[in-house]
Structure formats: structure tokens, C-alpha cells
Image (cartoon, grey):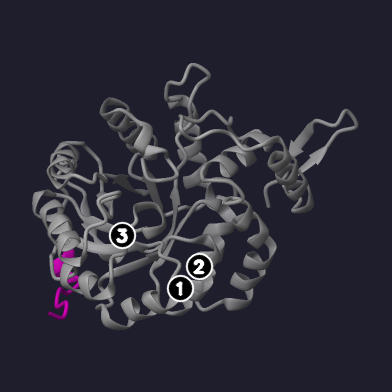
Amino acid sequence: MAATQTAAARTWLDGAQSGRLISVMELSGCGTALVTPFRADGAIDESALHAQVNAQIDAGIDLLIVCGTTGEAATLTETEWLQAIAATIAAAAGRAIVFAGCTHNSTAAAVERVERLNRVPGLDGVLTANPYYNRPGQQGQYEHFRAIAEASELPVMLYNIPGRTGANLEPATVLRLADMPKIVGIKESSGNLVQITELLTLLPRSFKVFCGDDLLALPVLALGGAGLISVASNVIPGQMAELVRAALKNDWATARRINRTFYRLMQANFWEPSPAPVKAIMAILGMGNEAMRLPMVPVSTATRRRLEALCGELGLMVYSEAGKVDNLRMF
């Protein structure tokens, strides 16, 4: 069945007692899939998270995704999950839209989690990925996402990332789900441009398709995507925000220039399993540390050296005579 929801029908007061009017018309631009900073003792570093959120917003980021794949959500306890979400909302203070990751391979558990998020003040929406490991078919995924949407008082963004979950959400299924008023968009990380093109051709314009892969941002935006949810923007938020803004304004010369400049950095974020490389780059540039939760581990020494060389080549840092970072030049 073709999706028929209008933009007007996709506007409501959020369910988190904040009274903020949320419209999918606001859902466009550049978002960041935030890393979760940890202290040396393994606890979430809330002060670092606050600083990170402020830097993102100051640089022009429109949307913050907390506790997603890049945020190592799978390794957080439920208490830590809610802690990171609350800290991000507090730091954002209404200056950017905040969506929280809410994924589980048990539909009942996912519904229970979204019901918890309904009670989080100031949260703007939910990002939920394919059920992992179970590898459900299309009808199973449809029923899973429908149950989440029916339980949610907040806007829901689907997240298709078959490389992580083992399940692909096909365009025909997305089209069926798009008929549900609470489901407002999708983060598409399949890497399949034919599939993404089909989505953008079939779905109504009010349904927002976000590219979930920095390397494919330009083609997806050219096809009509609403924006990008970026990993690279953890390090270069201003540049990625400018790239997306330029593309959305049809200023392709600017968008291509930024893409050419930082394409190797986008690739480098996946030289080893993410988010290890982006955390390494942040540590190299004095923006954080490399602390991670098992089973994820920091990058190898060889990869770190490659990342240091790349950061130098891109002008992200300069070295003093002592061989240490002398200052950070973000441009």
C-alpha cells in the first residue's frame, strides 16, 4: 500500500512532557552519530559528553543521535543508556534535535525500552535498527517496527544497517511502514544506492531518508535525501554540516570540494571496526580518548600511525619540534 501521510499529519507534541512541537519538516541537515566517551575507570564521562555536544551544536550540527552504533550502545547497561541520553539532552538544551537509539532483537524488549523513552523529558525521537542476529524476514521486521511505533509517543526513525544486523529492510516494507504516522523517516546504511534510489522514488517527500554512510552522502543527497547522519562529524562537525547544507542548496561545487578534501578521513573511520578509528582520531586531535568497551578495542599501533599521518596531511593538526601536537587547526 502506498504511503499517504502528509507532512501536516506528521506533526505532534512530543510525549516527553516538554511541550515541544516536533515536525518532520525540521528533520533535515547534518546529524552526528555521537561516540560515547568513557573515563579511565570505564564509566561514562558526562563532562566530556557535554563538551562534545556543545562543540557539535556550535559547529552547526542539526541532529544528535545518542546511543547508536557509534555510541557503543550494545555495551551499555540500561542505566548507562538512560544516563547518556539524559546528559545529551541536558547539554543540547533545545538547541538541536536529539534522537536516542533504541534497538533490541526481542520485540517485547524493544517495546519496553521505547516505553521508557516516552518518559524522558526533552527527547525528540527514537532511532531503531533491524532486529540483529535473528535475521527476520520482511513480515517479521514489519511487525517488529509496527509494535515499536504503536508503543512510541515520540517520532520513530527506522535504521537499516544490514551489515551489522544481518537483516535488510527492503523498500516495499519501508513503504508499508511509512503509512504509520509515528514513523517519520529512515537512516539508510545498506550501502546499496539502487535500493536507496528506489526508496527516494517511491516514498512521499514528507518521509525523510537520511544517508547513514559518509562516503555516500553526495549521491544520496543528489537523489533527494533529507540529510546525513555522520560518523566523520564527530571530528569535523562544521565541515560535514557545511557539506550537507551546500548540497541541500544545490551548491554542488562547495559540497564536492569538502567531500574531496575529507573523503580519505571518511574512509579512515572504517579502517578497523567502528568506532575505534574515530575515537583514535579524536584522541590524536585532543578531542577525547580511545577508551572503549569490550568486545571493541582501540585500533592497532599501525593503524594509529596511519591516522596520525592522515590528520597531518589534512591540516587538522601541526606538530611542535618536540613531536607533540602543538595546536589543533579545525577549518
Mark number, residue 167: 3
Give the camera-side residue of 251 and 262.
262
- CA gap between label 3 and label 2 equals 22 Å
Magenta-drawn segment: 1-10
For disc 1, the marked residue is 220
Q: Residue at x 46, y 21 (%)?
A: 42
Write down the residue under mark 2: 217
Task: Please identify the quarter of the rendering in which residue 177 is found.
Answer: bottom left
Within 10 Å of disc 1 (Cα), the crowding (few <14, some 14-19, many 20+) is many
Q: Position of residue 95 (x, y in %)?
A: 38, 46
**Quarter of the figure that contains the N terminus:** bottom left
Contact flag, marks 3 and 2 (Cβ < 8 Å) = no
Is disc 3 surrounded by few (<14), some (14 to 19) or many (20+) residues within 10 Å?
Answer: many
Secondary structure of the residue carrying tag 3 is loop
Q: In this view, does 3 lie to the left or right of 158?
A: left
Query: Mark 1: which amino acid?
Result: Val
* CA distance separating discs 3 and 1: 21 Å
Tell me if label 2 and label 1 are in contact, CB under 8 Å: yes
Prevalent SS, magenta region: loop
